[in-house]
């Protein structure tokens, strides 16, 4: 039996062929692929108040809108945003941090410095180093929790986009992480 061929790059709400070749009404989203002609980033380092050298990527989008601070989860670094950041940077500046001990940031030998409070402080110091006075935090997993800590302590946060932090969390558990 002939089956309908699925479009290679759907771009709008189109009928999607079912396995029997009959169109069904499913939302089809287009996916952007980062290519060499898309916006590049600049690499920067800053020194924290406790002397650690941390890394961030600066995707320099238009400065007229509030920038986005991308904060990765526990086992990732700024590279996790390398497909998303250039797309956001078409409309606004994007700063992606490598948390301490991850990616290109310096490792901290004191395990007591790997806390959400410290992550929030590092994010704040990155924003200051990048001359960003306010920003929207896009935090994935632990990065989202660090964004919550930053929002509670500083007027820097204009908004939060929380990805995969869980449907609920116990304050006592978060305090233990801090």
Image (cartoon, rainbow, N blue to C red):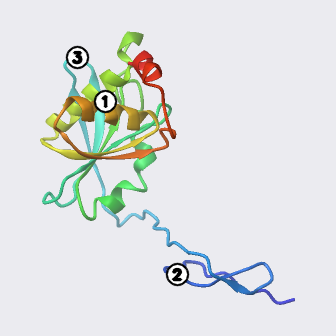
How far is disc 3 from disc 1 in space, using C-alphas? 21 Å
The answer to whether marks 3 and 1 mark residues whose Cβ atoms lie closer than 8 Å is no
Q: Dot 1: few (<14), some (14–19), or many (≥20) neighbours within 10 Å?
A: some
Indicate which label's residue lies in the foreground, 3 or 1. Answer: 1
Q: Which residue extends farthest right?
A: 1
Closest to the observer: 106 or 138?
A: 138
177 relative to 20 in the view: left or right: left
Q: Which mark is residue 13?
A: 2
Q: Which residue extends farthest bottom?
A: 2
On the image, the x and y values in percent for residue 146 come to 35, 31
The answer to whether marks 1 and 2 mark residues whose Cβ atoms lie closer than 8 Å is no
Relative to 109, does residue 33 appear above or below in the rendering? below
Local SS, label 2: loop
On the image, the x and y values in percent for residue 167 come to 51, 40
Q: Dot 2: few (<14), some (14–19), or many (≥20) neighbours within 10 Å?
A: few
Q: Earlier in the sequence, mark 2 or mark 3?
A: 2
47 relative to 148 in the view: left or right: left
Point 30% across, 61% down: residue: 39
Relative to 136, does residue 106 appear above or below in the rendering? above
Q: Which mark is residue 51?
A: 3
Relative to 94, does residue 23 appear above or below in the rendering? below
Quadrant of residue 61 within the rendered picture: bottom left
Query: Split into 4 quadrants, where in the image is the N terminus?
Result: bottom right
Q: Where does label 1 land, which residue?
A: 149
Point 22% across, 32% down: residue: 124
């Amino acid at each position: 039996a002939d089956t309908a061929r699925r479009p290679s790059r759907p771009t709008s709400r189109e009928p999607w062929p079912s396995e029997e070749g009959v169109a069904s009404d499913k939302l089809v989203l287009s996916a952007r692929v980062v290519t060499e002609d898309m916006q590049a980033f600049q690499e920067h380092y800053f020194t924290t108040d406790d002397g650690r050298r941390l890394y961030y990527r600066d995707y320099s989008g238009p400065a007229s809108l509030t920038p986005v601070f991308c904060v990765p989860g526990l086992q990732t670094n700024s590279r996790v945003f390398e497909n998303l950041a250039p797309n956001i940077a078409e409309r606004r500046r994007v700063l992606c941090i490598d948390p301490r001990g991850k990616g290109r940031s310096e490792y901290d030998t004191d395990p007591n410095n790997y806390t959400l409070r410290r992550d929030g402080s590092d994010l704040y110091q990155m924003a200051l180093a990048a001359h960003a006075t306010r920003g929207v935090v896009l935090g994935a997993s632990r990065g989202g929790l660090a964004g919550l800590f930053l929002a509670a302590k500083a007027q820097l946060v204009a908004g939060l986009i929380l990805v995969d932090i869980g449907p609920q969390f116990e304050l006592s558990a978060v305090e233990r992480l801090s």
